[in-house]
Image: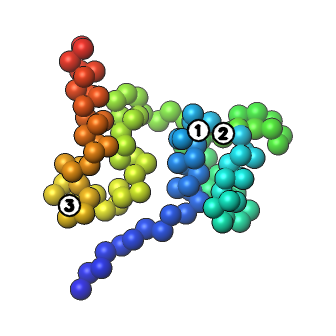
Amino acid sequence: MFYGFIMKEDAVIHLWRFINQNGNSVHVSDARKFLSSRGFNREAIDYAIDTLHKLFFLEYRGDGDEYFLKKIKILEEPLEDLPCLGCEHLHECHIGGDRYSPERCQYFEEWMQKVRIRLSRG
């Protein structure tokens, strides 16, 4: 019997969401406080910051302890707003999926509607 794979959310996912929810840039101390409040230790927090930096998803801005974690713009419109990229169910989602599928996702449908409007405006 197949029970499926359930991905445990880690510090990297929490940090990425936090940065996205806060204008794509956060002070490193705010990121550390946020992750610490979610139960992550210093090692996990440093790993999350380092991982997103090595993947070229964020950059450091500033100097010394006064620096910000800033999201690097990877994709241009309309793909930069694609809700799937930050979705916790991405690994379970596929066309015709039993639990998660793009054709039943309200966020994907809202995104598609925005794309349609942009395209109709020319």
Q: Which residue occupies the extreme left position in the image?
A: 96
- Residue 5 point in image, percent of width and height: 36, 73
Q: Nearer the viewer, residue 82 or 59?
A: 82
The residue to which callout 3 is attached is 97
Give the class, few, some or many, for how many residues have Cα within 10 Å of label 3's Cα (few <14, many ≥20).
Answer: few
At x 66% / y 66%, what residue is drawn?
39
The residue to which callout 1 is attached is 22
- Residue 35 point in image, percent of width and height: 65, 57
Question: How was this image coloured?
Answer: rainbow
At x 29% / y 28%, what residue is drawn?
114
* Residues at circles 3 and 1 in contact by the CB criterion of under 8 Å: no
Q: Which residue occupies the extreme top position in the image?
A: 122
- Residue 14 point in image, percent of width and height: 56, 55
Q: Which residue occupies the extreme right position in the image?
A: 64
Quarter of the view holding residue 21 = top right
At x 58% / y 38%, what residue is drawn?
22
The residue to which callout 2 is attached is 26
Q: CA distance from mark 1 to mark 2?
A: 7 Å
Describe the element under mark 1 as helix, strand or loop. loop
**Between discs 3 and 2, the one toward the N terminus:** 2
At x 39% / y 35%, what residue is drawn?
81
Give the class, few, some or many, for how many residues have Cα within 10 Å of label 2's Cα (few <14, many ≥20).
Answer: many
Q: Is residue 41 left or right of residue 101?
A: right
Q: Nearer the viewer, residue 117 or 79?
A: 117
Q: CA distance from mark 3 to mark 2?
A: 35 Å
